[in-house]
Amino acid sequence: MAIRFSCPSCQQPIEVDDNWGGQAVACPYCRRVVTAPRESTWPPGDVPVASPASGAFAPPPPPIGRPAEQVYGPPPRSTGGGVSSAGWALMLAIFAAVLAFAGTMLWWVGLYEAAIRQVGENAAPEQLQRAAQQIMMGGKAPVSPAAVTTLAVGILCGIAALALALRSFIADERHYVKAGAACLIGALIVVCQGLMVLMLLQQGGA
């Protein structure tokens, strides 16, 4: 007795021995591993069909008692159609960069306002620049809570981006460009903005 059925993937007819019923076999046409039914589902007397074990280009069927994944390897990993860890990592890294830029601008605005208070509103740009440099060199730069908070949130987003990028590498999602870009941006944000926050906190405590 033989079991005849159509391949669920390519719809081609397949014939296997009855002892392969309910077992994993390889389709001789599309080479997909499918489960053979226990009874024939293909009409008898139709065109001759090929056995999956005798096809010239078909891989041999897995032996009884061993799962098909041990012979043909596990199926490709699927991300479920949603955003991968690398995608989230890149978005977080970009958001961290935006927060870092905003925090830096807030700090510069505070420094500029301190320079204006020192030399007056009608001072020339060169005088304002020298006053800002003197304030920075003297360790008296104003510490804006908004700037520190924005920079700190940016650092946290950079750390999260690094963690998600590493998760993408470990899970082998194969989004290497996104994960690599997220690692680079996140590392720059964490290091540079971390040093800036430390400098602001030291000036605030001076």
Image (cartoon, helix red, strand yellow):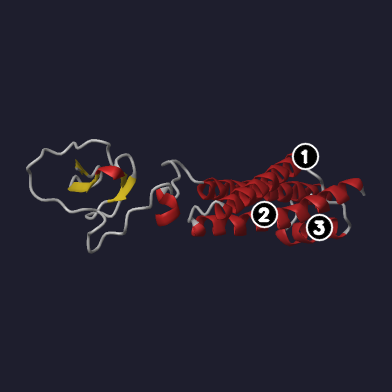
Residue count near mark 3 (Cα–Cα under 10 Å), binned few <14, some 14–19, many ≥20: many
Residue count near mark 1 (Cα–Cα under 10 Å), binned few <14, some 14–19, many ≥20: few
In the picture, measured across the screen, residue 147 lies left or right of residue 9, that is right
Residue denoted by label 2: 189
Q: Residue at left 71%, top 58%?
A: 125
| Residue 71: image location, x then y, percent | 41, 56
Residue type, label 3: Ala
Q: CA distance from mark 3 to mark 1?
A: 22 Å
Which element is circle 3 on?
helix
Query: CB of mark 2 within 8 Å of CB of mark 1?
Result: no
Nearer to the camera, 176 or 55: 55
Q: Nearer the viewer, mark 2 or mark 1?
A: 2
Which element is circle 1 on?
helix
Residue denoted by label 1: 145
Residue type, label 2: Ile
Query: Which of the two labelled residues, at mark 2 and mark 1, occupies the earlier sequence position?
Result: 1
Residue type, label 1: Pro
Query: CB of mark 3 within 8 Å of CB of mark 1?
Result: no
Nearer to the camera, 13 or 201: 13
The N terminus lies in quadrant:
top left
Which element is circle 2 on?
helix
Q: Residue at left 69%, top 44%?
A: 156
Residue count near mark 2 (Cα–Cα under 10 Å), binned few <14, some 14–19, many ≥20: many
Query: Which of the two labelled residues, at mark 3 and mark 2, occupies the earlier sequence position?
Result: 3
Query: Which of the two labelled residues, at mark 3 and mark 1, occupies the earlier sequence position?
Result: 3
Say the numbered circle drawn on residue 131. 3
Q: Residue at left 83%, top 57%?
A: 136
